[in-house]
Image (cartoon, grey):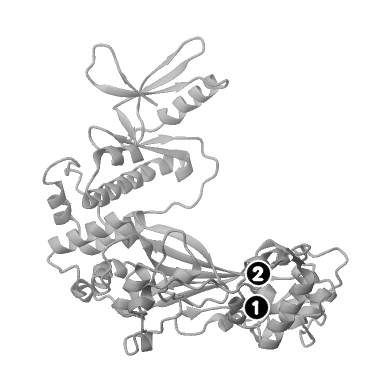
Amino acid sequence: MYSAKIYGSESQMTFALFQESNAKEDWTEYILRHSNVRHPNILQIFGVARSASVYAVLAHNELSPYKHFLEIHCLSPIMNVYMHYRWAMEEDDAQHYMDPIIGYVPPHAQTLWIDRCSGRLCIELAPILFAGPYLDMTDTLGRNPDYSIEFDHPNAEHKVIACLEVDQYHAICTSMLMRIREISIPVSMEVNLGAIARLPSGYQSSELLEIACIDALGLYGRVDKQIVDGGWTRFYCRSSELQEDNVLCQWSIKLPHQWCWLSQAHHIFKTLDIVSDHDSYVTVRGVRFELEIPPLPTHTREGYLFVCPPKDFQTGPHSFRWPDSPWYWSLDPTGMDVLSAWQALRLGFPPITINTTLFTSSWDTAVYGGLSQFHSAKGFDPESQDLALHLGEPLYCLVAPPAFVRAQGHPRSGEVECSFTDVAVETAAANPPELPTGGDALSPRQPPVMLMPESLVPGPSLFIEEFCSMYDLGEEVLARFQAHRFKRTNGFAFVELADLTKMGFLTGEIAEIKAAISTWAKRT
């Protein structure tokens, strides 16, 4: 796309140039695609041109790429929300217009442009590869915006604040400016749905710090497999279903007011003295538990995999984690004859890996700045919970003292680390943790004691099953290694000795593992 001006005219226009090997076919299809529609938010053709090898289409108005328009105009947070709302409504209106003419046009078949003079959305149509469901935004975002508001007018913000209700503003932030992230977490970690947690860039599991929670939640559970008697699910080992989908079960939250965090965010931030990096805080909206099952060898004997009931994952009203025994193999279709993990491996059944995925949502720091300004303009103190009470929303509760959160938000050498579930709701306020003070707080952290001493280097790379079998470590040791996703012995060089205790190994088992490693490894 290029900007252009016709000789003798003062109006800026835009033209598309086609120069590829199939330029003529693309040019012809482009013209036909846009000639059938007449809508102010869909690209309108002014004229066409062709020469021996160059084909062009001239369109009305000077258009700017969607993201580029936002960058060059540096809109305030409130105007940024409004323009996203306005463009969503314009796109929705265009979809309603196109539906009876050419059908639903999915997002991948659209290129979004902005008219640089009017600020209106302009949709350039592309070939439709496939069509998904059409999402009508009117019910979500409410009534149509006030199109008389000019994005560059000095009083534009005041007009936006006057024309939008608080819950409508929150809905726009949630529907259009929310960032969704999926992260893998340790399988030993307990997940509290609805919690607010700190998730910094370069995420590490030890840094996922819960700061607030909410009780008035609804839960939505999904199980992808058919449940059999007793709540357990049985799979025949050669069934194609066993290989097609690894998702075991998944839970999501249903908030009575899906944007209640936005009305209370600044209250929580103020109470905990959080003044920066607001985009590092996420709402925990869902969790997925998966079994990763490698293809079965052709010589594997017939057997059955039994998976525990979904209710076994729930540890509290809104908390979930892997149970101690989520699955087992059996040669008996009734499941009465349970094979241990060791026996299953010796019979040729593949090792199973378990995974946990967390679904979170967050907002950019600028969005939080706009929320504070919008709430104040509507007569509410953004650093209180008055707005939430006014809207009848459930209230968030702190789960850690402010001093502790400050220490975790600005870690220094020697300070305490906290995992996602280290702080309990019931005891945090009554028993604040003691932080190191004085010289101890600044003393260097002692180097960790590694499972493999510096005098040893890894031996031959073995599958963890081979290692445990070769050194007769037993099925319980193997099962714990597998539960923590150890696949080969290469990883032993990076394991701290204290990690074995955290993994649940007993003293005697740790001694046997160290003895086996000293035999397997080589001396430097």
Residues 266 and 223: in front is 266
Q: Residue 11 at what x, y percent from top left? A: 24, 21
Question: SS of the residue at dot 2?
Answer: loop
Position of residue 248 in the picture relative to residue 240 (left or right): left
Q: In this view, does 240 lie above or below 109?
A: below
Q: Residue 478 at what x, y percent from top left? A: 73, 77
**Quadrant of the rendered image containing residue 65:** top left
From where the camera sits, is residue 36 visible? yes
Label 1 environment density (alpha carbons within 10 Å; few <14, some 14–19, many ≥20): some
Residues 244 and 143: in front is 244
Position of residue 313 in the picture relative to residue 114 (left or right): right
Residues 252 and 140: in front is 252
Quadrant (top left/top right/bottom left/bottom right) for the N terminus: top left
Quadrant (top left/top right/bottom left/bottom right) for the C terminus: bottom right
Which residue lies under the disc numbered 1? 227
At label 1, which amino acid type do we have?
Answer: Ile
Which residue lies under the disc numbered 2? 485
At label 2, which amino acid type do we have?
Answer: Arg
Q: In this view, does 99 lie above or below 20?
A: below
Q: Residue 442 at what x, y percent from top left? A: 37, 72
From where the camera sits, is residue 396 visible? no
Question: SS of the residue at dot 1?
Answer: loop
Position of residue 354 in the picture relative to residue 407 (left or right): right
Q: Residue 147 at what x, y percent from top left? A: 20, 44
At a point 23% along the width and 35% down the height, the residue shown is: 118
Residues 505 and 170: in front is 505
Q: Which of marks 1 and 2 is in front?
A: 2
